Image (cartoon, helix red, strand yellow):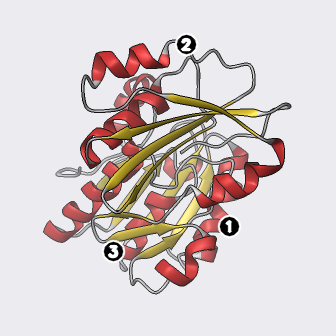
Amino acid sequence: MRPTERPAGSLRKVRLEARNADAARRAAGLLGEAGDPEPLAVTHFEDGGRHTVEAYYGPDADLRRLDDVLAAASPGTVSPLEHEVVPDENWVAISQAALPPVTAGRFTVYGSHDRAVAGWHRDAIEIDAGEAFGTAHHATTRSCLIALDRLTRARSFRSVLDLGCGSGVLAIAAARAMPHAHVIATDNDPQATAVARANVRHNGAGRRVTVLTAQGLAHPRLRGGGGFDLVMANILAGPLIRMAPAVARSMAPGSI
């Protein structure tokens, strides 16, 4: 989910029911990556085996093409979209209540409103939805967490880079999974790195995660290359392709 500042006027919400968890995650990913219109938030939650996906948009968003996007990519697996207007005064309550804990491999990511439910879990990570991307409700974040879980069960890593860290959730997860590794988390958005630093401290990873504001790998702490044996980059494909040569130079032999 990628919430942004709330626009003036009433938000608009679309809602669908999915046949199963895979269909729901696919639909959430399609809505999240549609681009035009770009959602303010996308959520997927399950209640008694029922999978629901909701997406929130600004008051001026043109939602007419969303049905075609879903129909083309997920034929027969999701219901038609239901549309409604979200009253102004309900935004905060709805945005928090619609974000249940997410399990991804060994990790559970939850908001502070679910601390009593999920906070006891050993690998639980508390991330409140805010202005930085990364609460694990987006399919790419959840997939990265699952991949991190599998990789760290198979081998150990000593130096980790989270490139485009957003909320810092992947860097925190890496620190949890690898207590002896040092993790550097970077983002080109100073607001995101401020959020990531706060989340890192809040989740007790401040001594093992360094958060830097940097354009790609253009930071003194990242120069020299050849040092990282694990690089995570949950960012858009275009920027990742452009940075691929620099990322490759930053990696140690045999790294991932």
- Which residue position is annotated with label 1? 198
User: Residue at image x 28%, y 26%?
Assistant: 74
Q: Give the label, 1 or 3, closer to the camera.
A: 1
Badge 3 element = loop
Q: Counting other residues with Cα less than 10 Å from the Cα at mark 2, is it few (<14), some (14-19), or many (20 or more)?
A: few
| Residue 231: image location, x then y, percent | 35, 50
Q: Give the label, 1 or 2, closer to the camera.
A: 2
Q: Are marks 1 and 3 in contact (CB under 8 Å)?
A: no
Sequence-first tag of 2 and 3: 2
**Residue 229 versus residue 71 in the image, above or below:** below
- Residue 176 seen in the figure: yes
Query: Residue 89 versus residue 229: which sits nearer the camera?
Result: 89
Q: Which amino acid does label 3 sit on?
A: Met
Residue 64, numbered circle: 2
Sequence-first tag of 1 and 2: 2
Q: Counting other residues with Cα less than 10 Å from the Cα at mark 1, is it few (<14), some (14-19), or many (20 or more)?
A: some
Q: Quadrant of residue 183?
A: bottom left
Q: What residue type is labelled 1?
A: Ala
Distance in Å between CA atoms under marks 1 and 3: 20 Å
Badge 2 element = loop
Q: Counting other residues with Cα less than 10 Å from the Cα at mark 3, is it few (<14), some (14-19), or many (20 or more)?
A: some
Sequence-first tag of 1 and 3: 3
